[in-house]
Image (cartoon, helix red, strand yellow):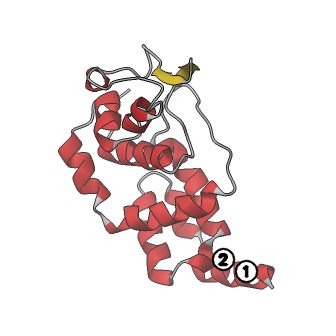
Amino acid sequence: MKYCPDDAVLLHLLRKLNITDPIGTWHKKIWIPHPLYEQRACCDGISQDTRAPLTVIDHCRTLRHVCTLLEVDHALAYNALQEEHWRILRRLLLWARQETRRTSARGNPTAYDYAPIIVRYARQFAHQFSTNELKTIAQWISQYYPEVLDINWNAAQAFNLLQER
């Protein structure tokens, strides 16, 4: 499968925010990346011992590792991460993290696959964002999920505020 920089940034944020985990197993209190699904050359120089058992799993959450894993140019993904919509989506994912359970499924979610989930959480937490922030999210995500343009975000914000009371 061909991945794009948005896919790499999304997987990086999902991992960094502990919404998904890299694929691997614990062995004698040390996390070992799965040799087929997770292990890459960038992991080779990282020492694994019981004094720092999270070193490798922390590395597997980095943008550099995710780009290597998905075969995406790191510079392109890094530049994409600086875009305004990713700052807003990071906040949205922080809100959503409280509602989701951690997963470590085979395969890596793409922006296209994850778009309906992001939209669902954007509706659920619309009152936490400004109208401009919601427009920014909708504009970016419309390339993966065009139905987002049909949502009345002002109504979603008002509905959520009324539900909170």
Measure how far apart labels 1 and 2 are at the Cα level: 5 Å
Asked whether 76 or 112 is in front, the reply is 76
SS label for mark 2: helix
Q: Quadrant of the C terminus?
A: bottom right
Asked whether 69 or 138 is in front, the reply is 69
Residue 36, given in percent of the width and then of the height, sits at 43, 14
Residue 35, given in percent of the width and then of the height, sits at 42, 14
Instruction: Residue under label 2, please give it.
Output: 156
Q: Decide: few, some or many residues near mark 1? Use Cα within 10 Å; few <14, some 14-19, many ≥20.
A: some
Asked whether 38 or 10 is in front, the reply is 38
User: As drawn, which residue projects farthest toward the front?
Assistant: 51
* Residue type at numbered disc 1: Phe
Say which residue appears at 55% left-offset and 40% top-offset.
20
Say which residue appears at 52% left-offset and 51% top-offset.
115
Q: Quadrant of residue 95?
A: bottom right
Say which residue appears at 45% left-offset and 33% top-offset.
57
Residue 82, given in percent of the width and then of the height, sits at 28, 61
Pointers 1 and 2 in contact (C-beta within 8 Å)? yes
Q: Decide: few, some or many residues near mark 2? Use Cα within 10 Å; few <14, some 14-19, many ≥20.
A: some
Rendered position, 116 above or below 153: above
SS label for mark 1: helix
* Residue type at numbered disc 2: Ala
Rendered position, 151 above or below 103: below
Asked whether 62 or 11 is in front, the reply is 62
Residue 105 is at least partly visible in this image: yes
From the viewer's perspective, is 36 left or right of 81?
right
Say which residue appears at 45% left-offset and 76% top-offset.
133
Instruction: Residue under label 1, please give it.
Output: 159
Q: Quadrant of residue 136?
A: bottom left
**How many labels, in total?**
2
| The label number, if any, that marks residue 58 in the structure image | none
Rendered position, 8 above or below 89: above
